[in-house]
Image: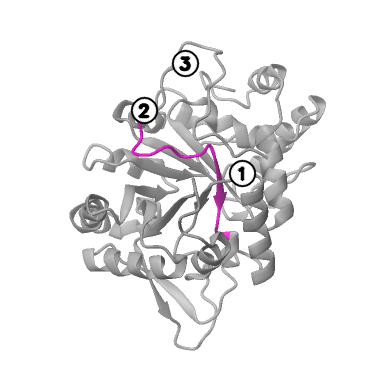
Amino acid sequence: MNSEPPTRSVHPASATARRSRPAAALAVPTLGFGGAALGNLYHALSDQRAAQAIEQALALGVRYFDTAPFYGYGLSERRLGAGLGDPTRDGVIISTKVGRRIVPTEDGAAAADGFEVRGHRALFDYSREGVLRSLDSSLERLRRTHVDILLLHDVGRETHGAQHERMLHQALDEALPAMAHLKATGVCRAIGIGVNEPAVCLEILPRFPLDFILLAGRYTLLEQNLGATGAGGGVLEEALRRGVGVLIGGPFNSGLLAAPNAPGETYNYRPVDAATRQRAERVYEICAEEGVDVGAAALQFPLAHPAVVSVIAGIRSAQEAASTVQRMRTPLPASLWERLRSAGLLAAGVLTP
């Protein structure tokens, strides 16, 4: 099959939808392979199954792969490097992250971070030296001399609590300048942040030039406050205004919208609460009545906003790779979005495909 195109047109449903997408530092395919599962997120994965997932994705035209040292404490990067093979493979885009050091655990136990990997844990490190050492290790695991996109991982108040201001200042004073230097010297082609928190995007955007924001789980079929005007909506609009490309991660809200027939049990990497599950069930009901796979709607929805240049879906098997590509290519009826809007499941003014 043909590869996914580097850009994706927006359905001309409104004048706003026809605005140009950001002139980003490089073209990124609209579908990305999320590599957290390759690091044994929640469940252990064999090397063979991981390799088959990457192989199938490549065969079906997927050319953007996102990973991080945090994902299995280097395991995801090692598996991705092995699975992608030839570093000169045409058209492949890789993003990885900095901001954590991988260190051994004293007792060889598994850390409480959700990854089924024993013997290592991750510590935040936004220092200049921490960034340089982290990327050196990543390049070795990925079997590359450079990466395409380098993202600063998980800066934000919800992540760091009372330490947020200190961590943010170090990110602005050390980590991001070090990343900009790496870009200037060709070790990466673009830089940005990879976060789950919208607020920190608005803190950083006016203070440091970025090429990309990877925002996970916050602009999805289930929650679209970022796409509306007013509170919270400033992230996508500010990114668009500044020409910063937005990569949407977690389109299935960490599993809640992943299954074809009913909501999953997790939301924001925790057991789903009753109110959120009820909302998800209503989304499933409407999609079923329209004959639509919820996963297809969830995957395609974010791309309607002109700030969004790619959607990254977590993949852990060849079957999931095939399903994800099929979901991206499935035509969706306009009546679906009308039904969801009438049911109050889409925020006012949010753009749809």
Of the residues shown, which amino acid type is indicated by label 3? Arg
Give the dominant element type of the magenta stretch: helix, strand or loop.
Answer: loop
Q: Quadrant of the C terminus?
A: top right
What's the distance in space between the residues labelled 3 and 2, CA to CA? Answer: 13 Å
Q: Is residue 45 above or below residue 219?
A: below
The crowd level at tag 3 (other Cα within 10 Å; few <14, some 14-19, many 20+) is some
**Which color scheme does this rendered protein use?**
one colour
The residue labelled by disc 2 is 240
Q: Secondary structure at mark 3?
A: helix
Q: Quadrant of the N terminus?
A: top right
What's the distance in space between the residues labelled 1 and 2, CA to CA? Answer: 27 Å
The residue labelled by disc 1 is 61
Q: Residue furthest left?
A: 173
Of the residues shown, which amino acid type is indicated by label 1? Gly
* Residue 342, x across and y down, in percent: 66, 17
User: Which picture quadrant has residue 352?
Assistant: top right
Q: Residue at the location (25% across, 56% down)?
A: 182
The reply to whether the magenta stretch includes residue 227 is no
* Residue 161, x across and y down, in percent: 35, 57
**Tag in front: 3 or 1:** 1
Question: In this orientation, which residue lies closer to the viewer: 190 or 44?
Answer: 190
Q: Which mark is residue 18?
A: 3
Horizontal side, residue 259 vs residue 316: left or right: right
Q: Residue at the location (43% across, 45% down)?
A: 214
Horizontal side, residue 69 vs residue 156: left or right: right
Q: Is residue 46 above or below residue 157?
A: below
